[in-house]
Image (cartoon, rainbow, N blue to C red):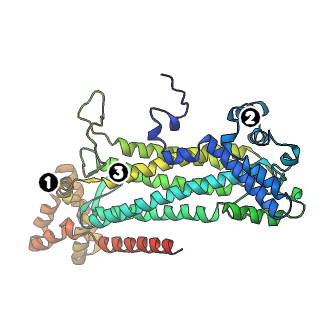
Amino acid sequence: MEFKSNHITNSKFYGKFYNTEKMNIIFDDEKRMQRWLDVEVALLESQCELDIVPKYIVDKLKEVADIKKLDCNEIKKGIENTGHSLFPLLKEWGKNLTSEYTNYIHYGATTQDIEDTSQMLEIKNILEILLKDMEDILDILENLSIEHRNTVIVARTHGQQALPTTLGLKIAQWLDESMRNYERLRRCQHNSTVSQLFGGVGTMAAFDGRGHKLIELFSKKLNLKNPEISWYSCRDRIIEILFAFTSTSGCFGKIANEIIELNKDEIGEISEPFIKGKIGSSTMPHKRNPEVCEQIVTLSKLVKANFYTSLDTFILEHERDYRGVRTEWVSITDSSMYLSKVLELIKFVLKGLKVNKENINRNLAASKEKIMSESLMFWLSKKIGKSEAHKYIYEVSMDIAENGGSVIDTIKSDYPQFDQEIDFVTDPYKYIGEADKIITNIITKKRKMKEENINE
């Protein structure tokens, strides 16, 4: 059996871990070539409306603008022989037609007009898919934050136990960040998906004074915005899109990493779903590794790497410089595939998130001496002042850390008249502040955003 895959995203063995079928369909070679033909046809139809190209010419060229009717092997050979990405397709398109028809193929446009416009159509499709997945994820996070709004857990700062919080508040924070990324993707969809049709150097000289009207018609047919000026060497829109991809994948990479951390044996509070039959180790049969979360983190790093590459396209030469486009053919394609897989995997993880309340309560009880220090300090500050209270709690805590013992018992010994008060202020379930109100605010904001988007 022979396997010829040479990129991880289309590997017959491992591709499904890096890519989704939804993205494969968009970036299929023949689909891309067909999209270029569709853009060329939209140009012809727009030119016809302005009496630049006769209708019978457009009808005939449109009839044969079908990649399935063309010889892809000839196109491939042509690209290899000419080094040109588009010309061989145009040649194959018109190979059985007379010059009466072929003279109007690609009339007045430059290659980058067609390929940039087509790439924006791809991006538009990509964003539609990603936004739908994001909406599903936002709903899952909302439900989880509600379900666990009263699940008190240990909060950690700088890798150390800090204070009590709730799992619902932690998840609400994930929700809020995810909402911002959703809005970033929406802004890209609304503001960055533009056409390109300005000719060789951006002057529209070949369109005989009708360029502005032509690009308006052309953009409308393709449901893209009119950029009003060429952007051949100005790739900031693409960079902004890739930043939105990076921010989104980074958010879910962080969530996945947090689940990995809280799944460690010594913590064991939450974990990704486990499906029987999954193998964690070839030599340690007991292992149940967080493989899905690890893959999410890996993919988020790959998206970030592509964003870094895209930053080089800020600096391009003169009126046109194809180095930017060729970079984007990699960065947009790979990042879209990786991000799509991130969204698929994080949906799986969050839908089946395992919450071990027994371990959560165990960890709360075991860390009670530490995580209630703030509560104790503010209670004591009402009696001896904050500075003195901080100094006292600090000295007791440091002594216990070095020599053993109990912070709470020591304080009770020093302040025996306040036993019941000390018990109350060292109850982690009573020291979660306004967590529930914060969760409610975020859920309200999310629902309002969803309603506004529906009504647009």
Report the Cα–Cα distance between label 2 and label 3: 43 Å
Q: Is residue 281 left or right of residue 376?
A: right
Of circles 2 and 1, the one toward us is 2
Residue under pointer 1? 405
Residue type for callout 2: Ile
Label 2 neighbourhood size at 10 Å, few (<14), some (14-19), many (20+)? some
Residue 69 image point, x, y percent: 69, 40
Toward which corner of the image does residue 126 lie, by quadrant? bottom right
Residue 403 image point, x, y percent: 18, 50
Residue under pointer 3? 349
Of the residues under marks 2 and 3, which one precedes in the sequence? 2
Residue 125 image point, x, y percent: 57, 55
Of the residues under marks 2 and 1, which one precedes in the sequence? 2
Secondary structure under tag 1 reads loop
Report the Cα–Cα distance between label 3 and label 1: 40 Å
The reply to whether residue 314 is in sight is no
Residue under pointer 2? 79
Q: Is residue 183 left or right of residue 46?
A: left
Secondary structure under tag 3 reads helix
Identify the image quadrant of the C terminus: bottom right
Of circles 2 and 3, the one toward us is 2
Q: Is residue 188 left or right of residue 77?
A: left
Query: Going 80% across and 64% down the picture, which residue do you hit?
Result: 49
